[in-house]
Amino acid sequence: MKHKDGKPFSQHDKSSKIVPMTIMLVVLCGFSFYLGGIFCSEKNKIKAMDVTKAVPSPKESTIAPLQIKSVSFPECSSEYQDYTPCTDPRRWKKYGLHRLTFMERHCPPVFERKECLIPPPDGYKPPIRWPKSRNECWYRNVPYDWINKQKSNQNWLRKQGEKFLFPGGGTMFPRGVGAYVDLMQDLIPELKDGTVRTAIDTGCGVASWGGDLLDRGILTVSLAPRDNHEAQVQFALERGIPAILGIISTQRLPFPSNSFDMAHCSRCLIPWAEFGGIYLLEIHRILRPGGFWVLSGPPVNYENRWRGWNTTVEEQRSDYEKLHELLTSMCFKLYNKKDDIAVWQKSSDNSCYSQLSNPDAYPPKCDDSLEPDSAWYTPLRPCVVVPRPKLKKSDLESMPKWPERLHVAPERIFDVHGGSASTFKHDDSKWEIRVKHYKKLLPALGTEKIRNVMDMNTIYGGFAAAVVDDPLWVMNVVSSFAANTLAVVYDRGLIGAYHDWCEAFSTYPRTYDLLHLDGLFTAENNRTLGRCEMKHVLLEMDRILRPGGYAVIRESVYFVDAISTIAKGMRWGCRKENTEYGVGKEKLLICQKKLWLSSNES
């Protein structure tokens, strides 16, 4: 990948010298090769001594493809079988306890990056396939009994023989998640007609709520930190339910503003009314105007529940009143309430926010200099992000219902440089053709063999839209350095996150069945501020890819051979294929990660 340390190479003036034609050709050839070495070493951080000469195909390119020497990566020790580099408990003691800052992303410096292959747990098996996986997984794939023991009375999961079973229980839904969501649908009729499509579940447990909503046409990002529950997000992904590691602490969540149609907290232990309501302000930012915030657990239904919360009825009444007052000041209104569930709705009327101009108002309105979609290592601010008045069709009531909204050009596409309804339509058509070609090359795509999918550098979510009818879900990743197109992805009813591929993604090892990337190395190579090597990106792909999983790599012919060489060193099997139109400037690598067992396995 590109690195800014390189300096431009200046040609020497040869006009004062007379050189025979034959010598001139030799000099120019050598000089061209030397420039190629400089380019590769500085742009990709691959040393010039590793570059070897290759003969280009005149039909494909006049630039020699990047070649590197063969490499073989060792195994990491077994203690790293569930290594999450940027949320590593081994490093927590280096960071503060205030607002659980230590649980946020803290990535290791370059010199501490692991250049080894993460081993699977002892006894690892290929995951159970969807939809059976929603209700069970192999114990050895996620060998943690903590939740099983601590939450046994709440029916989160149950160990039975070689498997964990997921009965669908939860702290606030002892009768099962189905009955809980049925009650929620009675309170929010919009859950039934396609109005609500995207949701976020903060403090998701093992993601049973998000799993149940899948059958109701609602796509949920289940969010939980790496905490003493050890593996909430890992359990969710092993089940085939969308999930990501994260916590609302001091930094914004990696999502654009006004994206989710619904946010949910079922006794997620987030102190919503503390610190001036700063956590609720983040929920307000990412929730679409007209969207719903659902809370079950303290202090809802305090009149009947306070005895079990080790508190007094007066304290719980005070907490509820404080929470309601705070939500009202943020332009939420109580939408419905019954038993343990309370629902608030974010106002879609901007006139409500006029009161925030009062100098004594709290929370105040955010100033215009604060970019509402800036969400990659952006601190939380104690202010309200007011929806832009010019957006007339981005509130929940104005959005087309699912599934129509998938193929309607969102209003926010015009915020993207060069974005328009025609470019949106062209992108969709392009990916329909590409995915048909991919399925010919990789017959497993579209079957139950592939469930968890990541599009590592999407633009408008075209790849995800083209596979929407397949038994899978797609995490759409938009580079934190690229144009902000993630808002468009959410507006069409898909999910995703911002990310910088110079760092590790917020997930556990072995959590995706398919990784797709379209020109990622070319795009990053042209980036202004690169600081990572190709091998580190590929090693991160190996970390998060399940054994037996696939990678579809669409890339410039300049990078394909180098990628293939590194992939071989990671024990992947790859083959080179033509693109759908056989264009010589690009090639496809269809790779599969092999299942290997640690040399230390008993």
Image (spheres, rainbow, N blue to C red):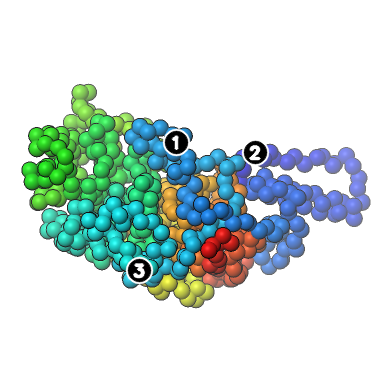
Mark 1 — residue?
Answer: 93
Disc 1 or disc 3, which is closer to the eye?
A: 3
Mark 3 — residue?
Answer: 161
Marks 1 and 2, Cα distance to the nearest angstrom?
A: 33 Å
**Mark found first going from the N terminus, 1 or 3:** 1
Marks 1 and 3, Cα distance to the nearest angstrom?
A: 37 Å
Amino acid type, residue under disc 3 in the picture: Gly
Q: Residue at x 41, y 74 (%)?
A: 447
Disc 2 or disc 3, which is closer to the eye?
A: 3
Residue 141's spot in the image, x, y percent? 43, 62
Amino acid type, residue under disc 1 in the picture: Lys
Lateral position of residue 49 relative to residue 470, left or right: right
Is the residue under label 3 in contact with that under label 2 (CB below 8 Å)? no
**Mark found first going from the N terminus, 1 or 2:** 2
Secondary element under disc 1, as helix, strand or loop, is helix
**Mark found first going from the N terminus, 2 or 3:** 2
Farthest residue, direction left: 303
Lateral position of residue 492 relative to residue 335, left or right: right
Circle on res. 5: 2
- Which of the two residues, 131 or 552, is positioned nearer the viewer here? 131
Residue 149's spot in the image, x, y percent? 30, 55
Residue 384's spot in the image, x, y percent? 26, 35
Farthest residue, direction top: 359
Q: Residue at x 14, y 45 (%)?
A: 308
Q: Residue at x 46, y 34 (%)?
A: 94
Residue 172's spot in the image, x, y percent? 19, 52
Determine which quarter of the picture holds residue 103: top left
Amino acid type, residue under disc 2 in the picture: Asp
- Which of the two residues, 57 or 572, is positioned nearer the viewer here? 572
Q: Residue at x 51, y 52 (%)?
A: 79
Secondary element under disc 2, as helix, strand or loop, is loop
